[in-house]
Amino acid sequence: MVKIGIIRCEGTMNACPGTGCFKSIREKSGQFKEYSDQDVEIIGVSDCGGCPGRDSVRAASEMVRRGAEVIFLSTCMTKPVPTPPGCEHPDQIAQAIRDKTGVRVVMGTH
């Protein structure tokens, strides 16, 4: 079993209820294909805290403290989904999470 945390874009949360992310987890599609032979436990889901990802590291650190082994930056953090312009800081956010927590960060969910 892999234990995951998800960081979502605060700006898209009103437009997107996360159904694509949860569908990809359930169907082991998108970035979850590599876990097709494992169960996935969701430790937590949090927003980034607004630009430029103010609370991402804090939220990821808390999820890791509670057992997350991998942090996913949701697709709305890595592409202009559901509407442009999209997050301008995903690589910096991912690196800051890696530096603080030491866990793997996956870019995108579905």
Image (spheres, rainbow, N blue to C red):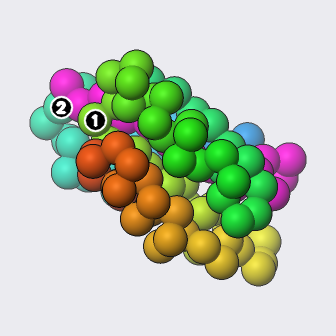
| Residue type marked 1 | Glu
- Image quadrant in which you'd find residue 68: top left
Image side of residue 11 versus residue 31, left or right: right
Label 2: few (<14), some or many (≥20) within 10 Å?
few
Secondary structure under tag 2 reads loop
Q: Residue furthest left?
A: 37
Up the image or down, 32 lies above or below 5; here it is below
Q: Residue furthest right?
A: 14
The reply to whether residue 49 is visible in this rendering is yes
- Foreground residue among 102 and 30: 102
Q: Residue furthest front?
A: 100
- Image quadrant in which you'd find residue 99: bottom left
**Relative image position of residue 62 (x, y in whole percent):** 49, 29
**Relative image position of residue 71 (x, y in whole percent):** 40, 45
Residue drawn at x 39%, y 49% is 100
Q: Which residue corresponds to mark 2?
A: 38
Image side of residue 15 versus residue 43, left or right: right
| Residue type marked 2 | Gln
Pick whichever of labels 1 and 2 is earlier in the sequence.
2
Is residue 6 magenta-colored?
yes
CA distance for labels 1 and 2:
13 Å
Q: Which residue corresponds to mark 1?
A: 69
Residue drawn at x 83%, y 52% is 15
Image side of residue 76 versus residue 105, left or right: right
Question: Which residues are drawn in magenta?
Answer: 1-15
